[in-house]
Image: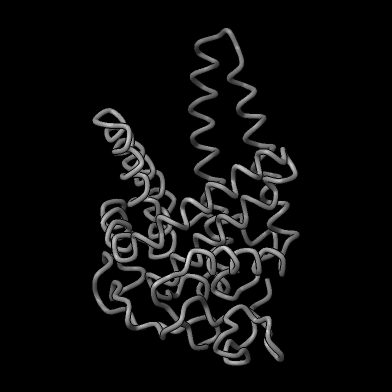
């Protein structure tokens, strides 16, 4: 895996390395310096969102944060995708093919086989989501991933537990009132991001997701709508459209996550481990 170049190479208005002399995406996303946004003291100690977290970005370059702009996040996601499209197209293709094959197992008259297929679909879906989250963290932090860099699991036990709890809470929101499910899903959307990025347990990740998204809920809601529209367009363009829509949505969401929560040591340590 290669690393992004020094983030100080690019101009202040060019955090993704498109300016002259820039070699990577290490500067991150946003307008003001990281440090204004609070976060947990220990990125691998499971501390929930809320305490100062002064960490540098990729390659010790300056990393910036601040309130997000939804269209800027989408634009940044597109820039990251087009600068490293092959692994993202391949991981999206793998995800769609495997999900389709597992889903086909459930088309049966056997109740036992259908139950097995449903359980397998959940497990496979979680694994694939964990892979894509890892790749997005590396990409946004300036460590351009190759395809093989996606296929590692981090804190997967708590990842599964957190996904189950979020699923239960979303279902309860649906039972109470339909809009409740959307509210729960929206505020807990970054739960699995925190589990992977900060090595958190399920409850700390849920709390952190709620606090982080609440801090810029208006802009993040606009981003959620735009991401939904991009996904719908991907579906309308059938299979090929999703190969671009899935990465762009994931990367735009990760750009926003990094902007709001600040940097961590995840990508630096992951690149050393690789």
Q: Which residue lies furthest to the top in this view?
A: 109
Q: Position of residue 114 (x, y in %)?
A: 53, 17
Please name the residue shown 60% across and 50% down the image: 230
Question: Taking 156 as reference, is 83 left or right?
Answer: right
Q: Quadrant of residue 271?
A: bottom right
Up the image or down, 17 lies above or below 145; here it is below
Up the image or down, 160 lies above or below 54; here it is above
Please name the residue shown 58% across and 7% down the image: 109
Q: Which of 78 and 192 is in front in this view?
A: 78
Please name the residue shown 64% across and 44% down the image: 233
Quarter holding the N terminus? bottom right
Up the image or down, 54 lies above or below 170; here it is below
Up the image or down, 207 lies above or below 34; here it is above
Q: In which quarter of the image is residue 216?
A: bottom left
Q: Position of residue 190 (x, y in %)?
A: 39, 56
Q: Which of 17 and 273 is in front in this view?
A: 17
Quarter holding the C terminus? bottom right
Q: Quadrant of residue 218?
A: bottom left
Please name the residue shown 68% across and 57% down the image: 88
Q: Position of residue 153 (x, y in %)?
A: 51, 54
């Amino acid at each position: 895996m290669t690393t992004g170049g020094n983030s100080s190479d690019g101009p202040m208005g060019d955090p993704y390395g498109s300016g002259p002399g820039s070699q990577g995406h290490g500067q991150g996303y946003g307008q003001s310096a990281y440090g204004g946004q609070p976060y947990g003291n220990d990125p691998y100690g499971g501390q929930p969102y809320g305490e100062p977290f002064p960490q540098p970005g990729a390659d010790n370059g300056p990393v910036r944060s601040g309130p997000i702009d939804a269209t800027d996040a989408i634009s940044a996601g597109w820039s990251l995708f087009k600068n490293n499209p092959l692994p993202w197209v391949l991981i999206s293709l793998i995800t769609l093919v495997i999900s389709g094959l597992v889903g086909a197992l459930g088309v049966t008259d056997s109740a036992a086989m259908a139950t097995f297929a449903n359980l397998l679909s959940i497990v496979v879906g979680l694994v694939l989501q964990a892979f894509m989250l890892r790749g997005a963290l590396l990409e946004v932090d300036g460590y351009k991933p190759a395809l093989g860099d996606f296929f590692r699991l981090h804190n997967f036990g708590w990842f599964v537990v957190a996904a189950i709890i979020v699923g239960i809470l979303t279902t309860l929101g649906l039972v109470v009132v339909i809009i409740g499910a959307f509210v729960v899903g929206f505020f807990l959307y970054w739960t699995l991001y925190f589990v992977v990025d900060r090595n958190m347990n399920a409850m700390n990740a849920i709390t952190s997701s709620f606090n982080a998204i609440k801090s810029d809920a208006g802009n993040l809601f606009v981003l959620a709508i735009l991401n939904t529209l991009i996904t719908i367009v991907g579906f309308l363009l059938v299979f090929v459209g999703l190969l671009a829509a899935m990465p762009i949505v994931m990367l735009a969401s990760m750009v926003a996550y990094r902007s709001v929560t600040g940097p961590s040591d995840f990508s630096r340590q992951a690149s050393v481990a690789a």
